């Protein structure tokens, strides 16, 4: 069976030292170690004789006994390696042949070794060779000792590296086990957390279902109780009260509509508004759309009168030149669109609609507006663009709830001074008119955010035009020559249009408008900023 090399043999091989085999010359140290059975560094007489014979120098037992007696005078009968080496080299060995085996020249001077002995007289030729042999063996022993020491250090290093690798493997396994254990614990904690979350979620869903069930039962109970009370009240109510309640329900629902737009209708059929069933249907309408037809007139009687619950009426994009006075019966009307027709004046019935919020009469042929706007106190949006209006009546300023006025593309020459009373006005559009100046008190319109006076004939802006909420101001295509100091009060202004005017200079205060994002001032006479 083959055996692996020991760490010591590997260290010797690394140090270029081979373990001696049978063919090599045995040195005294090799023989001494082989015969030192108890490894105490001493050999007895028998071992001494065996060492001498091993080295190839046979002597008689008597001679060997005499020699060992001379060197062991202390009575121990044992000698050390140094004594054995010296005795062998000077007394027993064939020095010349031993030197020749070791390839050492016998004519080399050994002054350094025997200088201390010259005082005792000249040495013999044999003694000279003996000291040379002793010196050679000492040198080899020294080299062997150093090699042995180096080999042992390498062996210890190899052993420590091996132990270190084992420890590293062990630590890595421990770390891996710890990491696996930590991962397992984390996974278990996540599963536990998820399980708790699912339990809580299920509990919440159950609680929610119980609450919804309770609410549904309460609603059902309330509905049943309300139905019972309604039934009792209906029994005790008169026919007039029943009708009023039904109208109230229709107004609240706001779902009954009649859409008849874009049908090329030239007139409204009598079937729509005559007869009991038609009256009932019209009485339930909330939104009526007759736009996009070719209507030239509306029924004078029994049409608007039946629409007592109507909230929105759209008769735009027709050919109407007249609206019957029965329009004033639409007391619930909130939105009225009669734009894009052929009206030359506003119907007087409009000014009785106290709930009207949105009125659009644009794209007609209206020349004048009646001075009867006092009744439109709920109106918020008034659109009368693309007409031929020349003047604005003073009563237009009585619409205290108005928020948007669009009178663009008309022939308006001036604005009434009472415009300052429209304190809720947010948007004013008067572009493409013939306005030459603005009222001095226009700055009282504190809520105004959008103003468009482009394509007019304005030359100067009032000095007190402090519209603090103003965001967009359009003054293109006028005759304005300069901006007054009112600019500094437009702190929230975002967009300013001044193109195609006669402006020569822009006030430096405009640079303090931190909110200003865009200013257009092309086609002016500005020479320097």
Image (spheres, grey):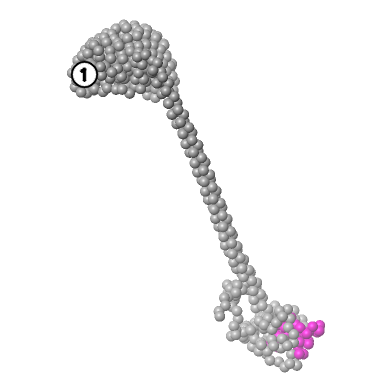
Left/right placement of residue 272 relative to residue 101 reads left
- Point out residue 94 in the picture as x, y percentages from the top left corner: 67, 89
Q: Residue at x 35, y 8 (%)?
A: 374
Q: Is residue 25 visible?
A: yes
Left/right placement of residue 243 relative to residue 84 reads left
Say which element carries label 1.
helix
Mark 1 packing: few (<14 Cα in 10 Å), some, or many (20+)? few
- Point out residue 113 in the picture as x, y percentages from the top left corner: 70, 79
Occupied quadrant, residue 391: top left
Q: Residue at x 59, y 62 (%)?
A: 170
Q: Is residue 346 visible?
A: no
Identify residue for label 1.
271
- Point out residue 458 in the picture as x, y percentages from the top left corner: 32, 12
Magenta residues, dominant SS class: helix
From which residue to which does the magenta span run? 65-94
In magenta stretch: residue 455: no
């Amino acid at each position: 069976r083959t055996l692996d090399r020991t760490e010591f043999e590997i260290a010797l091989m690394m140090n270029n030292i081979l373990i001696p085999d049978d063919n090599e010359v045995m040195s005294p140290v090799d023989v001494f170690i082989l015969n030192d059975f108890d490894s105490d560094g001493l050999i007895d007489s028998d071992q001494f004789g065996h060492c001498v014979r091993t080295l190839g120098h046979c002597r008689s037992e008597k001679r060997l006994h005499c020699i060992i007696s001379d060197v062991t005078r202390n009575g121990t009968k044992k000698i050390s390696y140094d004594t054995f080496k010296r005795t062998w080299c000077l007394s027993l060995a064939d020095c010349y042949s031993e030197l020749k085996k070791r390839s050492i020249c016998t004519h080399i001077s050994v002054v350094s070794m025997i200088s201390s002995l010259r005082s005792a007289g000249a040495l013999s030729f044999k003694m000279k060779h003996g000291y040379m042999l002793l010196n050679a063996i000492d040198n080899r022993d020294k080299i062997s000792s150093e090699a042995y020491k180096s080999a042992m250090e390498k062996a210890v290093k190899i052993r420590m590296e091996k132990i270190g690798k084992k420890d590293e493997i062990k630590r890595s396994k421990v770390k891996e086990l710890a990491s696996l254990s930590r991962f397992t614990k984390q996974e278990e904690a996540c599963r536990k957390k998820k399980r708790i979350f699912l339990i809580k979620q299920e509990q919440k869903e159950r609680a929610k279902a119980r609450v919804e069930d309770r609410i549904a039962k309460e609603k059902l109970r309330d509905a049943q109780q309300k139905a019972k009370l309604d039934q009792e009240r209906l029994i005790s109510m008169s026919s007039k009260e029943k009708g009023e309640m039904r109208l109230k329900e229709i107004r609240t629902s706001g779902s009954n509509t009649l859409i008849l737009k874009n049908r090329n209708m030239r007139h409204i059929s009598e079937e729509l508004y005559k007869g009991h069933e038609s009256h009932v249907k019209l009485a339930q309408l909330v939104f009526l759309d007759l736009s996009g037809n070719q209507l030239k007139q509306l029924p004078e009687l029994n049409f608007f009168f039946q629409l007592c619950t109507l909230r929105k009426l759209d008769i735009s994009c027709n050919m109407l030149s007249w609206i019957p006075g029965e329009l004033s019966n639409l007391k619930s009307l909130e939105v009225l669109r009669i734009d894009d027709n052929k009206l030359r004046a506003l119907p007087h019935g409009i000014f009785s609609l106290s709930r009207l919020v949105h009125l659009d009469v644009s794209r007609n042929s209206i020349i004048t507006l009646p001075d009867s706007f006092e009744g439109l106190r709920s109106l918020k949006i008034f659109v009368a663009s693309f007409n031929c209006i020349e003047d604005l009546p003073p009563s237009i300023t009585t619409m205290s709830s108005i928020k948007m006025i669009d009178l663009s593309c008309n022939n308006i020459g001036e604005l009434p001074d009472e415009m300052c009373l429209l304190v809720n006005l947010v948007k004013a559009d008067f572009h493409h008119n013939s306005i030459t100046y603005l009222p001095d008190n226009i700055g009282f319109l504190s809520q105004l955010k959008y103003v468009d006076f482009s394509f007019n004939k304005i030359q100067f802006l009032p000095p007190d035009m402090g519209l603090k909420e103003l965001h967009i101001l359009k003054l293109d295509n006028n005759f304005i020559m300069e901006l007054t100091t009112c600019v500094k009060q437009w702190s929230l202004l975002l967009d300013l249009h001044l193109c195609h005017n006669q402006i020569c200079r822009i006030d430096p205060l405009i640079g303090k408008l931190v909110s200003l994002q865009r200013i257009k001032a092309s086609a002016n006479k500005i020479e320097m900023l």
